[in-house]
Amino acid sequence: MIHDLLRLPGQPDDPAPIRLPLPQDANNVRLMARAAHPQMSADDLARLGKLVTTKPDDETVWTVHSASLLDSRTFDVPWLRSIRVIGRPAQQAKSFVHCAPPVDWIMAQRQLTTEDRCRLSAALVEVMLLGTMTQHRGRGYGTRLLRDAEERYAAAGYAAVFATVRTERAGVIDGLRGRGYTIGAPGVAPLLYPWADPGRASAVYDYVRRGVHFAVKALTGRVIVDERGGLVIVSGLLADEPTQQPA
């Protein structure tokens, strides 16, 4: 969930850098995560705090084994999972973003081959959490962190970035549209076509709940994002060539 993207008129620029998190940031990150996603469990918050304090690097390798009568292979899937914060090293974090591919959902898509699911894990990334401490809101920290995430994932070869946002966050929705995101109707799950050929298998990202919008932005020209009556359609996530528009 994205909690803050607003910049209020008259707020001075803050040169505080975007940086990797430090152990001192764990408490503020948990507070911001709870504000952005009030339903987060205590266990999830604890895991997030551990990620802040013990894993400063981005790259993780997922090992996936495909076993069948016709195919038995092991795939090492490098993918980026990252937290960035705003704040000088001597300060606690003022704002943070947490991004990762939606690996649990991707691996559940059994209509795709294991190899294609692994490739999709390195092509689609979610802005899982983005928030700002209450006293620092309105300075555009969220926009800075989102822009940085888009640039980092595009440079790493990812094809699209997406987020979910609650209906009551109208300012956040407007900010995402201003950054080129396509926004779906509340509660409407998007349709994803991994390949350039729209006749091949599709997948529904069915984690979109009532009162929540799906927002997506292409990071490469091979991906087409369309919106039809509130339904978002994303085509070409695994394309090696220009994508055809689905019928």
Image (cartoon, rainbow, N blue to C red):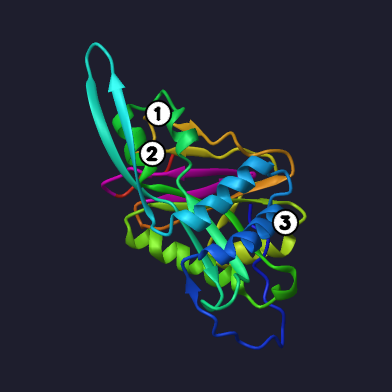
Q: Amino acid at mark 2?
A: Pro
**CB under 8 Å between discs 2 and 1:** yes
Q: Is residue 221 above or below residue 124?
A: below
The image shows residue 94, relative to residue 187, as above or below, that is below
Q: Is 230 covered by the magenta stretch?
A: yes
Report the amino acid beneath label 1. Ala
**Residue matched to label 2:** 194
- In the rendered image, residue 72, in percent from the top left (x then y), is placed at 23, 20
Q: Secondary structure at mark 3?
A: helix
How many residues crowd around disc 3 within 10 Å: few (fewer than 14), some, or many (20 or more)?
A: many
Which region is colored magenta? Answer: 223-241
Q: Residue at x 26, y 46 (%)?
A: 240
Q: Label 1: state its secondary structure.
A: loop
For label 3, the residue is: 35
Residue 227 screen position, x and y as percent = 56, 48
Number of residue marks: 3
- Say the numbered circle drawn on residue 2: none
The dot on residue 201 is 1
Nearer-N-terminus badge (1/3): 3
Residue at image position (42%, 23%) is 110
**Callout 3, which amino acid?**
Ala
Marks 3 and 2 sit apart, C-alpha to C-alpha, by: 33 Å
> Which of the two residues, 23 or 213, is positioned nearer the viewer here?
23
